[in-house]
Amino acid sequence: MDIVLLIVFLLFYTMAVLFFIGWIVGYPIYKKIRKEPVFEDARYALGLAVPSLIVALCNVAIQILLYFD
């Protein structure tokens, strides 16, 4: 059961990191293509904060699972 939870948390971790990298690179490019100001609204910061929170929570959960294993 612990290995299944570990795999699930690692998948969430990986998806959040990939989304974070894609957002940090892709959102400014998208806004420049549409000729809109990049840092006008809070979507850019929210798009970076949410995956960062998920990565941090998954990291804590993975550390707890590995500690008690």
Image (cartoon, rainbow, N blue to C red):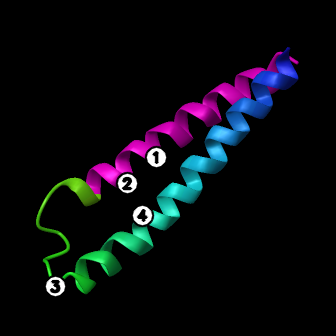
Judge by depth and name the residue closer to the eye, 49 or 34: 34
**Mark 3 secondary-structure assignment:** loop
The image shows residue 44, relative to residue 3, as above or below, that is below
Q: Residue at x 34, y 70 (%)?
A: 27
Q: Which mark is residue 23?
A: 4
**Image coords of residue 53 (percent x, y):** 45, 39
For the C terminus, the image quarter is top right
Task: Using the image, tell me which numbered label, if any, was put on residue 52.
Answer: 1
Q: Are marks 1 and 3 in contact (CB under 8 Å)?
A: no
In the shown orientation, is residue 51 left or right of residue 38? Answer: right
Task: Give the mark, 3 or 4, whose residue is nearer the N terminus.
Answer: 4
Q: Nearer the viewer, mark 4 or mark 2?
A: 4
Q: Which residue is mark 3?
A: 35
The image quadrant where one finds the N terminus is top right
* Disc 3 residue type (three-letter): Lys
Indicate which disc, 4 or 2, sits on the residue closer to the N terminus.
4
Magenta residues span 45-69
Q: Are marks 2 and 1 in contact (CB under 8 Å)?
A: yes
Sequence-wise, the earlier of marks 1 and 3 is 3
Q: Is residue 38 inside the magenta stretch?
A: no
Q: On the rendered structure, is 22 left or right of 61?
A: left
Of badges 3 and 4, nearer the viewer stands 3
> Disc 2 marks which residue?
48
Q: Nearer the viewer, mark 1 or mark 3?
A: 3
